[in-house]
C-alpha cells in the first residue's frame, strides 16, 4: 500500500469520509441510550401550565391497587373531562429511584407516603405545596391526618388516600376451640403465648427475610414503653440510641423471642400469612394488608384483629397505621388539573372509588362509605379512629438509610442471638444523619 | 524493540537523504496527511473519550465522593468528610467485615470446587463421548439464564417447606427441615453451590476451547514416552494450556469479587450473605442511599479488584514484550 502513495491519495477521501461517517454515526448511536437514560424512564408528561390533563406516576403496581387507581383516574376523567396519563412503575423500583425520579422529569402527581420520607423531599424543595387543595378538603380529615400531611415548613403537601393499621391477626375458630382470650397487657400476651406453645402451635407468626417486618414489633414495643413522641424523636435522631429507654425495648422484646416463629429469617410475610391461614401459628403481627393473602373467603371470614397490648403507662394511645396518598412534584405544582386530581382523591367520593376495588385498606376521608365494611375492616377503622397518635412505621418515620442499612441487619442479628449493640446503632446513626 | 519499530517503518521513508538533525528540526518526514491525522485522532480519540466518560470519570468521581458526605440531591449539598466514610465502614458498619470474609470464602470455594469441576467437565466432554454437545449445552445453560430465573430455580430446590432438597432429606414440613436460605450458618454454602452451578459451566466452555487448541501430537508424544493418562494431562496438556489457565485464574478471582446476583435474589445480601458488591448496591442504589459510604465501599472493592487486573495485564503484556 505504502508503495503506491498516488493511489492512496486519490482513493483516500471517499474511504475516509466513509470511515468518518461511520465513526460519527457510531458516536451518535452511543449517545442514544445515554439521552434516554437522562429522562429517568418516565413517560412524556404535560407541560407545567397545561390544564387539559396531567401525568400520574404510580408505584402501586400490584394487581389490585393498580386496578383501583385505574378506577380512580377513570372516574376523575369522567367527572372533569381532564385526561390522566398513568405511568405504573413496580413499587420497589419506584421507591428505590425516587431521588432521580424527582430530580429528573417527574410526573405531575405521584403516589407516596406520609412521614419523614415525605418531609425530607418537601424540605429539599422537590414537592409542590397544596394548601389550596387543603382549603377545600380540610374538613374531610382528622387532625392526626392533617398533621401527617404537613411539611416541615408548615405548608400542606400530602393528600392521604388510605391507611392500614398494624396489629395482631388471628383465626377466631382456633382461638375459640382452644379457649384463648385477647390479651390486654403484655404479661397476658406472654402467658397466652406460653399456653399456645404448650398446645404445640407456634404462638407468634413472624417473617423477616425481607428485613422490614421486624420493625413493626420494634415500633410497638418502643411506643408502648416510651410513648409516641419518643418514637418520632428517635426516628428523627433527636434522641440517642445509646440510652436505657432503647435497651429496655430490646430487653422487653427478648421475652417474646422464644415465642416467635424460629424460621422467621427464611420466610417472607406472605409465607407467614399462609402459616397463619394453615393454623400453624397462633397470631401474627402485621399490617392489615395481610388479608390480601387470604384468598379463601372462608379463611378471610375467620380472621380477627386486636391492637398491640399495653406495656407501660401509655396504654394503647398510639397505633401504627402508615398512610399512603398522593404528592405533587414541583412541576405538577403549576398544573391546575393536577391540583384538581389531588382534590378529588381527598374527597369521600374519590376514596370510595378506590376502595370499591381495593378493600384491604381503610379510606381516610370522613364520610367515606363504610357500609361495605366487613366486621374486620370496621375494627381496623375504629382502632385508627380511636388512636391519639398515628405512627408511620419505622422505615417511613426514620431516615431511609437508617432503616434499610442499619436497622435491617441489626434486627436480623437480634432475632438470631437476642443481643443488640445500641452503642453501635448510635455510632451509625450519627454518621448517617450527618450526611443528610 | 527498536528492531521491531524499524520493521514497521515503510521502506521508502526509512533512510531519507537528509541527516538526522534535519529530520528533527523540520519534521519534514510527512507520512501522514492532515486528513490522515484527523481520521486517526478521531479513531483513537473517540474510544478514548468513551472510555474516559464511562469508565475513568465515574471511577475518579467515586473515589472523590468517598471522601464526602452527600444526600444525592443538589450538588451544593456535597460536603467534605475526610476519611470519615472509611472509618465508618471499617469500625461502625457491622456487615463490612463479614462481607470481606464472605468474599474470601467465595473465592476459595470457586477456586477449589467450581473451577476444578468445570475443568473436570471439560476433560470428560472432550473424550468424544456420545451426546457430548447435548451435555455441553446443558452445563452451559446456567451461564445464560437471567437473574430472576436463577432465583426461581434455586427457590424450588431450597424452599424450606416444599423445596426439593428438604423433600429428598425427608424433613420437608417438619420442624427439623433445614432452612437453607434463612439459617445464616448455612445459606452462604447454599448460595455458593448455586454460584458453582453457573461458574462451572463457564469454566467448562473455556477449557473445552483450550483443550481443542492443544496440539494432538503432544499427547501422542507423551503416550509414546510411556506416560499414562493422568501424567499426560497434568504434565503435558495442562501446562500447554497456560494462556487459558491465566484467563481462568483471573475470571475466578473477578467472579468471586463481583459475586452478587445469587445472594441478591435470595435476600439482598443480608443475614449471613453479606458480600461487598451487595453492600455497595445497598448503599448506593435505592432509598437507603448514602453516597459517601457507598462510594467508600466501591473504592475498597476497586482496590481489591486491581490486584488480579494488574496481575493479568502484566502477564499479558509482559509476554508480548518478550516476543
Image (cartoon, coloured by chain):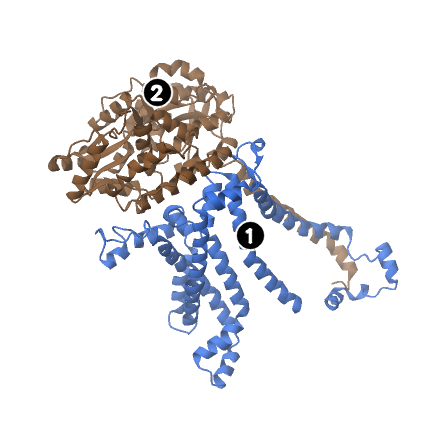
Chain colours: A brown, B blue
In the displayed structure, B303 sits above or below A378; it is below
Which quadrant of the figure has residue A229?
top left
Q: Nearer the viewer, residue A46 or A133?
A: A133
Which quadrant of the figure has residue A164?
top left
Q: Nearer the viewer, residue B39 or B2?
A: B2
Callout 1 touching callout 2 (CB < 8 Å) = no
Check residue A144 in the rendering and tell me which mark sits there, or answer none: 2
Residue pictured at 88% horizontal, 58% vertical? B22
Residue pictured at 57% horizontal, 40% vertical? B65
In the rendered image, residue A155, in percent from the top left (x then y), is placed at: 45, 18
Residue B44 seen by the camera: yes
Specify whether B5 is left or right of A308.
right
Q: Residues within 10 Å of mark 2 (few under 14, many from 20)?
A: some
In the rendered image, residue A403, in percent from the top left (x then y), is placed at: 40, 36
The chain carrying label 1 is: B
Pick the quarter of the image with the N terminus of chain A.
bottom right
In the rendered image, residue B269, in percent from the top left (x then y), is placed at: 40, 47
Q: Nearer the viewer, residue B10 or A162?
A: A162
Q: Which residue is mark 1?
A: B303
In the displayed structure, A245 sits above or below B217; it is above
| Distance in Å between CA atoms under marks 1 and 2 | 51 Å
Amino acid at each position: 500500500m505504502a508503495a503506491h502513495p498516488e493511489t492512496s491519495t486519490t482513493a483516500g477521501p471517499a474511504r475516509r469520509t466513509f470511515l468518518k461517517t461511520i465513526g460519527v454515526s457510531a458516536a451518535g448511536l452511543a449517545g442514544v441510550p445515554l439521552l434516554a437514560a437522562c429522562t429517568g424512564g418516565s413517560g412524556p408528561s404535560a407541560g407545567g401550565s397545561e390544564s387539559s390533563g396531567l401525568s400520574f406516576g404510580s408505584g402501586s403496581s400490584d394487581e389490585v391497587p393498580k386496578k383501583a387507581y385505574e378506577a380512580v383516574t377513570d372516574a376523575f376523567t369522567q367527572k372533569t373531562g381532564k385526561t390522566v396519563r398513568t405511568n405504573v412503575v413496580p413499587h420497589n423500583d419506584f421507591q428505590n429511584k425516587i431521588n432521580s425520579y424527582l430530580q429528573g422529569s417527574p410526573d405531575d402527581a405521584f403516589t407516596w407516603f406520609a412521614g419523614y420520607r415525605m418531609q425530607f423531599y418537601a424540605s429539599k424543595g422537590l414537592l409542590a405545596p397544596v394548601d389550596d387543595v387543603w382549603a377545600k378538603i380540610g374538613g374531610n380529615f382528622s387532625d392526626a391526618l392533617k398533621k401527617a400531611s404537613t411539611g416541615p415548613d408548615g405548608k400542606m403537601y400530602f393528600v392521604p388516600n388510605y391507611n392500614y393499621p398494624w396489629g395482631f391477626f388471628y383465626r377466631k375458630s382456633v382461638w375459640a376451640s382452644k379457649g384463648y382470650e385477647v390479651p390486654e397487657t403484655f404479661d397476658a400476651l406472654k402467658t397466652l403465648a406460653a399456653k399456645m406453645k404448650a398446645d404445640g402451635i407456634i404462638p407468634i407468626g413472624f417473617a423477616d427475610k425481607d428485613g422490614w417486618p421486624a420493625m413493626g414489633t420494634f415500633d410497638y414495643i418502643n411506643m408502648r414503653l416510651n410513648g409516641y413522641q419518643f418514637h418520632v424523636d428517635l426516628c428523627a435522631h433527636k434522641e440517642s440510641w445509646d440510652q436505657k429507654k432503647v435497651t429496655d425495648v430490646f430487653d422487653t422484646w427478648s421475652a417474646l423471642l422464644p415465642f416467635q416463629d424460629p424460621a422467621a429469617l427464611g420466610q417472607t410475610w406472605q409465607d407467614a400469612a399462609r402459616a397463619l391461614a394453615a393454623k400453624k401459628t397462633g397470631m401474627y403481627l402485621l399490617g392489615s394488608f395481610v388479608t390480601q393473602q387470604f384468598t379463601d373467603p372462608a379463611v378471610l371470614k375467620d380472621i380477627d384483629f386486636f391492637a398491640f397490648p399495653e406495656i407501660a403507662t401509655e396504654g394503647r394511645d398510639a397505633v401504627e397505621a402508615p398512610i399512603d396518598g398522593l404528592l405533587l412534584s414541583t412541576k405538577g405544582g403549576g398544573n391546575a388539573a393536577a391540583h384538581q386530581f389531588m382534590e378529588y382523591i381527598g374527597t369521600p367520593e374519590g376514596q370510595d372509588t378506590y376502595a370499591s376495588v381495593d378493600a384491604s385498606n381503610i379510606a381516610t376521608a370522613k364520610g367515606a362509605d363504610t357500609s361495605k365494611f366487613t366486621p374486620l375492616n370496621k375494627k381496623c377503622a375504629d382502632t385508627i379512629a380511636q388512636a391519639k397518635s398515628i405512627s408511620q412505621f419505622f422505615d417511613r418515620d426514620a431516615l431511609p438509610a437508617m432503616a434499610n442499612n442499619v436497622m435491617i441487619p441489626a434486627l436480623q442479628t437480634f432475632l438470631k442471638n437476642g443481643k443488640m449493640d445500641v452503642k453501635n446503632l448510635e455510632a451509625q446513626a450519627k454518621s448517617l444523619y450527618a450526611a443528610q | 524493540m527498536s528492531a521491531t519499530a524499524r520493521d514497521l517503518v515503510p521502506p521508502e521513508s526509512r533512510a531519507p537523504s537528509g541527516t538526522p538533525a534535519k529530520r528533527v528540526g523540520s519534521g519534514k518526514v510527512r507520512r501522514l496527511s492532515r486528513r490522515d491525522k484527523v481520521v486517526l485522532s478521531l479513531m483513537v480519540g473517540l474510544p478514548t473519550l468513551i472510555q474516559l466518560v464511562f469508565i475513568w470519570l465515574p471511577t475518579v468521581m467515586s473515589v472523590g465522593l468517598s471522601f464526602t458526605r452527600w444526600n444525592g440531591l443538589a450538588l451544593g449539598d456535597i460536603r467534605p468528610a475526610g476519611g470519615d466514610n472509611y472509618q465508618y465502614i471499617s469500625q461502625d458498619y457491622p456487615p463490612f467485615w463479614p462481607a470481606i470474609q464472605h468474599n474470601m470464602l467465595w473465592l476459595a470455594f470457586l477456586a477449589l470446587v467450581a473451577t476444578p469441576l468445570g475443568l473436570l467437565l471439560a476433560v470428560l466432554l472432550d473424550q468424544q463421548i456420545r451426546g457430548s454437545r447435548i451435555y455441553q449445552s446443558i452445563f452451559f445453560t446456567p451461564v445464560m439464564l437471567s437473574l430472576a430465573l436463577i432465583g426461581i430455580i434455586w427457590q424450588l430446590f431450597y424452599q424450606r417447606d416444599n423445596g426439593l432438597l428438604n423433600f429428598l432429606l425427608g424433613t420437608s414440613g417438619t420442624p427439623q427441615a433445614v432452612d437453607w436460605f434463612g439459617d445464616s450458618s448455612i445459606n452462604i454454602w447454599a448460595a455458593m453451590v448455586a454460584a458453582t452451578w453457573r461458574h462451572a459451566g463457564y469454566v467448562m466452555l473455556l477449557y473445552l476451547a483450550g483443550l481443542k487448541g492443544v496440539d494432538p501430537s503432544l499427547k501422542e508424544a507423551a503416550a509414546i514416552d510411556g506416560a499414562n493418562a493422568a501424567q499426560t494431562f497434568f504434565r503435558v496438556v495442562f501446562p500447554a494450556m497456560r494462556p487459558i489457565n491465566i484467563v481462568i485464574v483471573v475470571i475466578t478471582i473477578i467472579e468471586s469479587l463481583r459475586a452478587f446476583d445469587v445472594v441478591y435474589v435470595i435476600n439482598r445480601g443480608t443475614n449471613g450473605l453479606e458480600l461487598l458488591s451487595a453492600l455497595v448496591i445497598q448503599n448506593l442504589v435505592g432509598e437507603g442511599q448514602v453516597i459517601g459510604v457507598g462510594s467508600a465501599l466501591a473504592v475498597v472493592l476497586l482496590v481489591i479488584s486491581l490486584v488480579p487486573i494488574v496481575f493479568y495485564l502484566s502477564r499479558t503484556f509482559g509476554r508480548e514484550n518478550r516476543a
